[in-house]
Image (spheres, grey):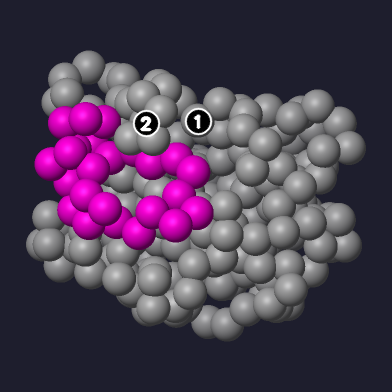
């Protein structure tokens, strides 16, 4: 299915989507964009984003500058107790205290069996450079070895072996945050697609191939 003037994107399990290149999502001015699913200006706190047994998040992320802070969180759902019950957080690291981590990234979250942990394994595997736009994916299934990170249509390392439900609703939950359509810190989300299921490898690659041309890939 194509959204407005956007590319053909897999819609089976698609629960929310934002895209700066699609006029139905972003008119091109201002700091507000709109869901391609329900026209909301933010995902809010949907039921699919807690007590997660499987999920896929596919994001086109741009590194807009270098920094000396700890990390940006361009896709995040912290919930009420920070890292005690966070659902999913994309960390986009900076050069904190000269640790040479600027441009690294990884997905984190809280699981019922592992607590606060990396839910994918990509830290240090690749470094985004200033100005670069990359397709970063979280592919998670509690029954399939936990999480897997992808970069530009290819897997980074393997499954983390984390088990348990992500973002348990043992206490109050919070809204999903997205650093888009405008940049925040060193990060800018250009588009993001949320699925309430684990996409297959072929499906992740198909989505990547459908969208990569507008980023010169």
Q: Position of residue 65 (x, y in %)?
A: 29, 43
Q: Which mark is residue 35?
A: 2
Dot 2: element: loop
Front residue (pair 92, 191): 191
Quadrant containing the C terminus is: bottom left
Of mark 2 and mark 1, the one earlier in the sequence is 2
Span shown in magenta: 1-25
Residue drawn where x is 42% and y is 22% of the image: 40
Residue 83 quadrant: top right
Query: Crowding at label 2, few (<14), some or many (≥20) Cα neighbours within 10 Å?
Result: many
Q: Percent from the top left, x then y, of residue 71?
A: 52, 45
Residue 128 position in % (x across, y down)? 33, 61
Residue at image coords 64%, 55%:
108
- Does 20 sit above or below residue 93? above
Left or right for 115, reference 49: right
Mark 1 neighbour density, 10 Å: few (under 14) some (14–19) many (20 or more)? many
Taking the magenta stretch, the answer to whether it contains residue 4 is yes
Specify the label residue 43 is tagged with: 1
Identify the element where label 1 is drawn.
loop
């Amino acid at each position: 299915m194509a959204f407005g003037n956007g590319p053909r994107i897999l819609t089976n399990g698609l629960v929310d989507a934002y895209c700066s290149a699609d006029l139905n999502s972003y008119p091109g001015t201002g700091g507000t964009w709109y869901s391609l699913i329900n026209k909301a200006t933010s995902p809010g706190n949907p039921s699919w984003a807690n007590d997660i047994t499987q999920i896929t998040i596919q994001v086109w992320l741009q590194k807009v500058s270098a920094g000396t802070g700890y990390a940006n969180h361009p896709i995040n759902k912290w919930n009420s107790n920070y890292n005690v019950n966070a659902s999913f957080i994309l960390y986009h690291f900076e050069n904190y205290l000269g640790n040479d981590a600027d441009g690294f990234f990884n997905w984190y979250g809280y699981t019922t069996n592992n607590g606060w942990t990396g839910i994918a394994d990509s830290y240090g595997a690749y470094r985004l450079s200033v100005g670069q736009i990359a397709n970063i994916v979280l592919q998670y299934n509690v029954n399939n070895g936990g999480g897997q990170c992808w970069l530009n249509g290819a897997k980074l390392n393997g499954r983390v072996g984390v088990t348990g439900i992500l973002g348990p609703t043992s206490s109050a939950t919070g809204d999903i945050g997205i650093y888009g359509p405008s940049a925040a810190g060193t990060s800018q989300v250009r588009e993001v697609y949320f699925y309430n299921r684990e996409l297959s490898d072929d499906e992740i690659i198909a989505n990547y191939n459908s969208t990569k041309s507008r980023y010169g890939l």
